[in-house]
Amino acid sequence: MRVVFRALTAVSAVSGIVALMLWNHGDLVSFVYFTVQSALIIAAVSAVAVFRPVPAWVRGAATLYSCITGIVYHALLANPSSPFYQVDEGAHALHNLLLHTVTPILAAVTWLVVERERVRWWYAAAWLGYPLAYLVFALVRGAFVHEYPYPFIDLNKLGALGVTETSLGFTVAFFLLGLALIGLGVLLRRLLTRSDEDARVEDAARV
């Protein structure tokens, strides 16, 4: 089951990137976006995990980044009531469905239900390394090209104070999301393990 879900996650992420490249006629600027980069991470980690062991903290990090992509897109970028709402011509395109919905769901289900790994709570803080590095990358790049991949880190519109506030808010939110993935993993591991043990007891009693 683990192999199947890991493979499905990798295929979904790669298919989403390929579909996006076809939609954008091969425009490599797509790789500037956190969406595509997180899809590459979860695809690589999931694909490798199909064939050989990958540390739980690495798989957890990749899962968090994929979940961030899905949540930020649906809650902020595709939500008309959000101050960061953006009209997306490809909202109903295949790449959008795969990258922002299917892949994050598969990643979360694989981590929470199928793998049920035990990791330390402080990993939620360590996992913030990549999102923070991405923020630095996006701001430095923006200083040269004068455009930013997302409205909530757009210095041209929000100014330094606005970007600082949103960045701090996202950092806290992502940390809490990491804690949630770890905590739910612990809870589901206990519940499902207990369920498996009960099922084995019942089967033994019937025999």
Image (cartoon, rainbow, N blue to C red):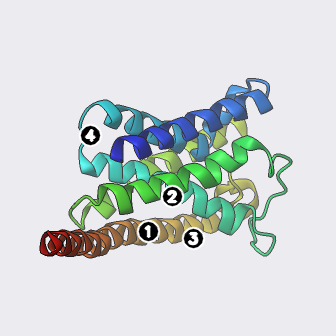
Rendered-image quadrant of the C terminus: bottom left
Q: Is residue 138 above or below residue 75?
A: above
User: Marks 1 and 4: CB-CB under 8 Å?
Assistant: no
User: Toward the viewer: 204 or 147?
Assistant: 204
Mark 1 vs mark 3, foreground winner is 1
Mark 3 vs mark 4, foreground winner is 4
The x, y position of residue 33, in whole percent, is 62, 42
Q: Earlier in the sequence, mark 3 or mark 4?
A: 4
Tell me the residue that label 4 is attached to: 54
User: Marks 1 and 2: CB-CB under 8 Å?
Assistant: yes
User: Marks 2 and 3: CB-CB under 8 Å?
Assistant: no
Tell me the residue that label 3 is attached to: 165
Tell me the residue that label 2 is attached to: 67
Q: Is residue 183 above or below residue 77?
A: below
Q: How many angstroms separate mark 1 from mark 2 (CA)?
A: 9 Å
Q: How many angstroms separate mark 2 from mark 3 (CA)?
A: 22 Å
Amino acid tagged 4: Val
The x, y position of residue 27, in whole percent, is 74, 26
User: Toward the viewer: 35 or 53?
Assistant: 53
Tell me the residue that label 1 is attached to: 177
Does residue 64 appear anywhere in the picture? no
